[in-house]
Image (cartoon, rainbow, N blue to C red):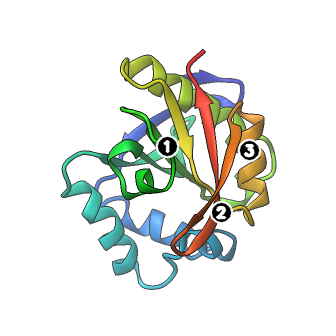
Amino acid sequence: MDTSVGQFRLQPVRLPRDLAQVAGWMNDPDIAAFWELAGPKELTEHHIRVQLDGDGRSVPCLGLLDGVPMSYWEVYRADLDPIALHYPSRPHDTGLHLLLGPADTRGRGIGSVLLRAVAERVLRERHDARRVVAEPDIRNVPSMHAFLKAGFRHDRDLPLPGKHAALLVYDRR
């Protein structure tokens, strides 16, 4: 998809091809603080493998900007995920998790542009979905800012196991 920051596309993660890339990002201290997947690549591999071997409710993807891998995404059915126990979920709520890999992609507004583009694509392609949700840790100020700048709204705080999150919602327009 064309965006103001370049040509962007999501492609499903393939193991072992993409493992070194994603595991490297997970070991960046800025990312590790919130994803909790720092350590040996087997930890990241297990996290991804569970999704790939699952029932399709969560799809791990690489984000490529102008053909270069630069982000990791999880697009998932939030209404079928354990997160749904912590907020008033609606049928077909679709959740997003995002990390921007290379440090030079952070803090430049790229995340908010891509979040809006992906949220719009989700709502365009998943006709039954009425909204896209996210639950970043409230301490992750750059992530919170990117989601809000992308057009997500703060719905409520969510005390979750392992983190205090904010429920952010992008409504179908």
In this orientation, does residue 110 appear?
Answer: no
| Residue 173 point in image, percent of width and height | 60, 15
In whole angstroms, how far apart are the C-alphas of marks 3 and 2?
A: 13 Å
| Residue 114 point in image, percent of width and height | 62, 35
Q: Secondary structure at mark 1?
A: loop
Q: Residue at x 26, y 64 (%)?
A: 49
The residue beneath circle 1 is 88
Give whichever of 149, 163 is nearer the camera.
Answer: 163
The amino acid type found where label 3 is placed reads Ala
Crowd class of label 2 (few under 14; some 14 to 19; many from 20; radius 10 Å): many
In whole angstroms, how far apart are the C-alphas of marks 2 and 1?
A: 19 Å
| Residue 19 point in image, percent of width and height | 37, 66
Question: What mark, if any, has residue 154 been given in the picture?
Answer: none
Figure quadrant of residue 138:
bottom right
Q: Is residue 34 left or right of residue 9?
A: right
| Residue 99 point in image, percent of width and height | 58, 56
The amino acid type found where label 1 is placed reads Pro
Question: What mark, if any, has residue 137 been given in the picture?
Answer: 2
Q: Residue at x 57, y 47 (%)?
A: 134
In whole angstroms, how far apart are the C-alphas of marks 1 and 3?
A: 23 Å
